[in-house]
Every structure is written in structure tokens, then in C-alpha cells.
Image (spheres, rainbow, N blue to C red):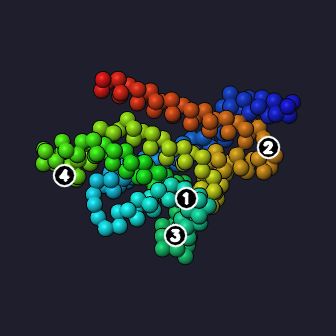
Amino acid sequence: MEYLAAAFQAAFELIVSFDADLWEIVALSLRVSLSAVLIAALIGLPLGAAVALFSFPGRGALIVVLNALMGLPPVVVGLVVYLFLSRAGPLGVLNLLFTPTAMIIAQVVLVLPIVAALTRQVIEDLWGEYREQFVSLGAGPARAIPTLLWDGRITLVTAVLAGFGRASAEVGAVMIVGGNIDHVTRVMTTTIALETSKGALPLALGLGILLLLLTLLINAAAEGVRRYARAQLV
């Protein structure tokens, strides 16, 4: 217990001392995860709504695939993105491997199915509730998508937060495509894994505490926005 208490104390001192390396890692982690979630939301929200409202051959299979991709193994995603971005891969000329951009791409692949699948469920439920009203107004699925996305925005925040949780906790994929290079692609999760393997528990623990605090703060902010929006609707 004394060893654990000492590690917590050292981690706390590291945080309050505003260590430059520590905050550089935190800033890069936030930039990568928030960028990935934003891109995944811009693609996944309309994609999920379209799958919910349009009928087309293979729709059932697509829903099964979307649901299955929610549990994509990060190391597999990292390997596939690595093959695409490597020098011999089809996107190798872009020289994106071992850059924050490559890490964002890998996280988008992981987060997109989560946002799309949860959005499909939300919009499908709303369509069942409002379908007759839209039909009576002569509005088809294409015109209903923006309205339903706006009407379900409070619930859809949960889908986006689920995506952020996946992105912020990810290690395997970003380690493969980012390389965990100091001052270039080192983020909180990869640093925690590295420092733990080296036995440097204070830094690993400090980053773990910061990661938990950031997740709590973002979720608390989202809950505040959700309650405010719900209150405005009453």
C-alpha cells in the first residue's frame, strides 16, 4: 500500500507541477481523439440515418456488418491502416505513416461504426414515431433525415460520447500507425503502456488520472448541454 500511495503522490506532484512533456502528450491526445470523433460524427450521423430510413438490397446485411464493426479489434485496424499507408501501400505516396494524421485515420475507422450503428437505432425509433406525420406532409426519407437528426440531437450526443470513449482509450491501433515517437506521435495511452513497461509508474499513473479526469469533464459537459437542451424543449 505504501508503494501505491507513493506512486499516487508522485503522479499528483507531476500534474500540479505542469510538466511540459506531460501537457504536450495530453494536448496531442486531445487533438487526435477529438479530430477523429468529429470526422466520424460528420460521416456516421448521416450514414446511420440513411441506413435507418432507406430501403435497399442488402440493408439487413449492412446493419449486421455495422453492428459487428462496433467491436473491431484495434490491432487489426492498426495493421490494415498500416498496410494502406506504408511505402508499398496504395496511400504510401502521402507519407502519413507515423504521423498524428495516421493516428486520426485509425481512430476514425474505429469510431465510425459506433456512431453510425447507434445513430441508425435512434433515427429508426424516431421514424416509427413521426413517419405518418412526414408522409402526410409529403416529405420522404431524404427530407426527413435533417429533421430527425436535429430532433434526436440530445440522444445522439450519447452516440458521439461512446465514440470519444473508444478513441480516447485506444492503444493498439495508434501504436502501430503512430509508432509512439517522442514529441511527435506520443499520446496518453501509448505513454501509459510504455512507462508501465519501464517501471516508471508515477508518469503512467499521472497520465491515467488525467485521462480519467478529461473523460469525466467531457461527459459532464455533454450532460450539462443535454439537460439544458431538454429544459429548453419543455
Residue at screen point 59% across, 64% down: 76
The image position of residue 220, as x and y in percent, is: 51, 29
Disc 2: which residue: 200
Q: Earlier in the sequence, mark 3 or mark 4?
A: 3
The residue singled out by tag 3 in the image is: 84
Q: Secondary structure at mark 4?
A: loop
Label 3 close to label 1 by CB (< 8 Å): no
Callout 3 amino acid: Phe
Q: CA distance from mark 3 to mark 1?
A: 17 Å
* Mark 4 Cα-neighbour bin, 10 Å: few <14, some 14–19, many ≥20: some
The residue labelled by disc 1 is 72
The image position of residue 163, as x and y in percent, is 49, 47
Q: Three-letter amino acid code at disc 2?
A: Ala
Mark 4 or mark 1, earlier in chain: 1
* Rendered location of residue 104, percent (x, y): 51, 54
Give the crowd class for mark 2: few <14, some 14-19, many >=20 residues within 10 Å: few
Residue holding disc 4: 140
Look at discs 3 and 4 and give the one toward the viewer.
4
Q: Earlier in the sequence, mark 2 or mark 3?
A: 3
